[in-house]
Image (spheres, rainbow, N blue to C red):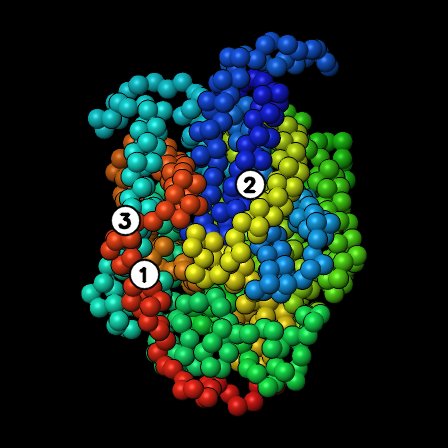
Amino acid sequence: MDDPNMPVETFRAYFLGCCWVAIGSFINQMFTFRQPSLTIGSTAIQIMLFPCGQFLAKVLPDWGFTAFGRRHSLNPGPWNNKEQMLATLMVNVGSTSSNFMSYVVVMKLERFFNQSWVNFGFIFLMNFSTQFFGFGLAGLLRRWVVYPAKAIWPSLLPTVMLNRTLLLPEDRHSIHGWKMTRYRFFFTVLIAMMVYYWLPGFLFTALSTFNWMTWIAPKNLNLGVITGSNQIGLNPLTTFDWGVIGYSAPLAVPFFSMANQWFGMLISAFIMIGLWYSNYKWMGYLPINSTSSFDNTGAKYNASRIINEDLTLNAENYKNYSPPFLSIGYVMIYGSEFVMFTMSVVYIWLAERKALTTAFGSFYRSIRHRKDNSNFKEYDDVFCRLMSKYPEVPDWWYLCILGVSLAFAIIAVEVYDTHTPWWGVIVIIFICIFLIMPSAIVFSITGYQLGFNDIAIIVAGYMVPEHAIANMICRVFGWNVDAQAESLIGDQKLGHYAKIPPRALLRGQLLATVIQTFITIAAYNVLTESFSDLCASDQANKFVCPFPNALYTATLVWGVVGPKRIFNTLYPMLKWSFLIGVLVGAPVYYLRWFGMKYVPFIKNWNPIMMIAGMSLWNSGYNMAYYTPGMEVSFVFMYYIRRRYLAWWTKYNFVLAAALSAGVALCAILVFVSLQVTNVSIPWWGRTVSGAGVDGGTYPAVKFTVADGEIFGPTYWE
């Protein structure tokens, strides 16, 4: 049901939305460099918005004016669910961290590339461009991933349920013996989690990194590498911390998606172990799961020895130093991603060809007949019928936003010393547009985001060879544009569920993104001035910058050294991954299609998700982060959903929202009150997880080299 007369774009909705966008984007930008990262998500924001909205509804006077036949007031009545959702969507868009600020860290920090020319003007132009370019893509993709009923966007359902819990009336009736309202249930779980999180979050951190198997023999290399929470993580019980368990969103993502990813990750774990022990491509000399690059002595790769002052490759120095070696974990990420990218294009086209063809026709008609502003008439589900009452946002509006952001990007790369040709940015953007469709479709159904940053850096490595900054600029458009677009598309689906008028949603999203563009820059400045050892591996407050470090490695490998050298000299098998993806896309689709006729269970097999699971490895993120999520998903998303559907329908997504909000709020409280002031309680429960091989006290490599010796090929240039 929907009430089209319910106030949406009110003063109090915009006021609270802007305030919490500023607060959320500042905090989230700060904590994105921490591991594990802490995020004020839409669940926590809704909790904070709700009492604020109720307060303003009581204290604001009913002052207003009439315009266009409608009265606009500071206080149009009780705080309603549409105001709450509009403010939440603004915060959801604006409070997220800006991915580009990680690139700024790598460009500016002395421990990375130390580029003094990266000033406010360049940062603003790039931040604005990458954030707003996603609007254009999001608007164009509505027909594929917003309007179709099968695009449920499972990761958004806790936000929808929380909105209903806080603001819509609820009947009290018994469900399997439970009479508790969702509202009371939410705040009971929230408070309980905020009390409990002090244990794994501060007092007894071994409950968070529960690598209990390694406690048996901390010095044992094999035990530490196989079961350690910082290595492979083969451990049936890895944590008691919801911040770790909830990393994979197990109460929102469908069980079939979680299971496919987990089994793919398990298969890749055994592949990695076998290759590491056999010292394939000298990987036994390196940590098994690291996103750093190493030289031929096993030390961290020293980029200053192979680059000139303008960050181009010095071929002679490179020849005299070392090629960059990658861990088997990092090679697994690249290989599986390359297969996944090309396979997903083929697979999604075969699986969704009818829907894709229909949507393309709809897009063509909307451009040709611009006066017809409604795209809902081609869809016959209840949501589209209700939304058809509101004026749609014309496609050419989104195209204009796309054009402005593209102009900002070209100005940035041409005016500043980026060594990036303007046409290179356009090439990367066209690749993004081509690949975002299968990615968004997969995301809307499974809750998994593919991402295309690795494709961009390889293409850039060929277009602008042997230059670090140019490679990073192309990569940020390859990732940030698609990530922003998919985030905005998801928010459009939230607005679709909540029946927010499309033009009201667009206005709120644009305003929130403008605020976020400036606030994230301010957060970066505060962070760099507060910590002189930012991004160091032993940073006291855990601001170790996992993504900037991985970005630095990738830039060295694919930007400075270049894909030609990597593919031809060190890891030639990687280039065949693209072809493998193309060749297996059609066979696995038809295998699943025919198999479902005879083996019904095979319908739950998703080859894209299984390959995606093989790419989930990252420094510090491994099976220890996904096994507990798989276990929780089995209990709630499979067993309880099948046996106690009424209970699951009423409480599951409320539980997800309450647990995540409790962790976020308490983690921020712990950080502000204790960790910033370096308060510590030195005892066994806080130190045991960091002892031994898994904690880095002892080397986590299978083979070592003697002083003065090297491993690897004799010639590499």
Say which mark, if any, is on residue 690: 1
Q: State whether residue 91 appears in this view.
A: no
Taking depth in this image into account, of 664 and 683 the one nearest to the observer is 683
Tag 3–tag 2 contact (CB < 8 Å): no
Taking depth in this image into account, of 596 and 3 the one nearest to the observer is 3
Name the kind of residue labelled 1 in the image. Answer: Gly
Residue positioned 52% across, 46% down in the render: 30
Judged from the image, the secondary structure of the residue bearing numbered disc 3 is: loop
Residue positioned 70% across, 40% down in the render: 398
Judge whether 348 appears above or below 393 on screen: below
Judged from the image, the secondary structure of the residue bearing numbered disc 2 is: helix
Q: Which residue is mark 2?
A: 26
Say which mark, if any, is on residue 273: none
Residue positioned 65% across, 67% down in the render: 468
Taking depth in this image into account, of 165 and 408 the one nearest to the observer is 408
Q: Which residue is mark 3?
A: 204
Residue positioned 40% across, 72% down in the render: 287
User: 10 Å neighbourhood of mark 1: few (<14), some, or many (≥20)?
Assistant: some
